Amino acid sequence: MKCPFCGSLDTRVVDSRATDSDDAIRRRRECVKCSQRFTTFERIEEIPLTVIKKDGTCEPFNRGKLIAGLGRATVKRHVTASRLEKMVSDIETQLKNEFKYEISSQELGEMILRHLKKIDKVAYIRFASVYREFKDIDEFMAELEKLQ
Ligand SMILES: [Zn+2]
C-alpha cells in the first residue's frame, strides 16, 4: 500500500480491526520511510450481475424474481424454497468465481437447467420442455407468471 504522504511502498500494518458494522476491516498503517500513519479499509467487492436479454437490453439480476419463477415451475414437486435459494446462490457464486458479471438470458437459462437436472428430474423436464420452446428465460418467466 503506497504511503499517501511520501509515496513510499514500504508501509506496515500497526493495527487491524473490524468496523462496527462488521462489513469491513479497518487497518492502521505506518509508513516505514516517513512514519506518517493512515487508514485503509478492506471490504467485499459487490458488483451487480447483469442479465442481457434477447433483445439486447440489460437488467440487473433479480434473485427474488428468479426464485419465484422457479417456485412456480416446481409446483407439486419435492423442491423446497430453500433448495431453490441454494441453487440460485450456487449459480451466483459460480459466476462470481469466474469473474463473470454479465450473462445472456439464454446462458442463464441453460445454467438453471443444468442445476435443476441434479435436483429434480421431473421439474427439469417440465422446465426444459417449456423453456426450450421460448429459448429465452424472460419469455419463459413471463409465461410462468401467466400460469399463476
Ligand atoms: Zn511515507
Image (cartoon, rainbow, N blue to C red):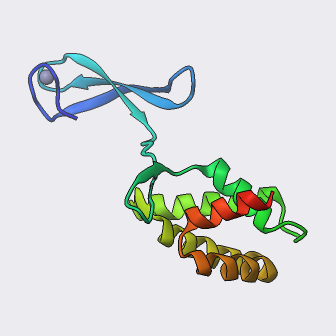
The residue furthest front is 146
Say if 111 sits above or below 5 in the image: below
Residue at 84%, 61% in the rendered image: 80
Looking at the rendered structure, the number of numbered marks drawn on it comes to 0
Which residue is nearer to you in this view: 51 or 38?
51
Left or right: 18 in relation to 58: right
Q: Position of residue 63 (x, y in %)?
A: 62, 51
Give the quadrant of the N terminus.
Answer: top left
Q: Quadrant of ligand 1?
A: top left
Residue at 45%, 42% in the rendered image: 46
- For residue 7, which quarter of the picture? top left
> Residue 126, can we see it?
yes
Residue at 44%, 66% in the rendered image: 54
Which residue is nearer to you in this view: 37 or 86?
86
Say if 69 sits above or below 11 in the image: below
- For residue 83, which quarter of the picture? bottom right
- For residue 38, which quarter of the picture? top left
Give the quadrant of the C terminus.
Answer: bottom right
Q: Position of residue 78 (x, y in %)?
A: 88, 70
Left or right: 6 in relation to 44: left
Left or right: 56 in relation to 37: right
The residue furthest top is 36
Left or right: 72 in relation to 60: right
Q: Position of residue 97 (x, y in %)?
A: 45, 61
> Residue 84, can we see it?
no
Say if 148 sits above or below 28 in the image: below
Which residue is nearer to you in this view: 111 or 35?
111
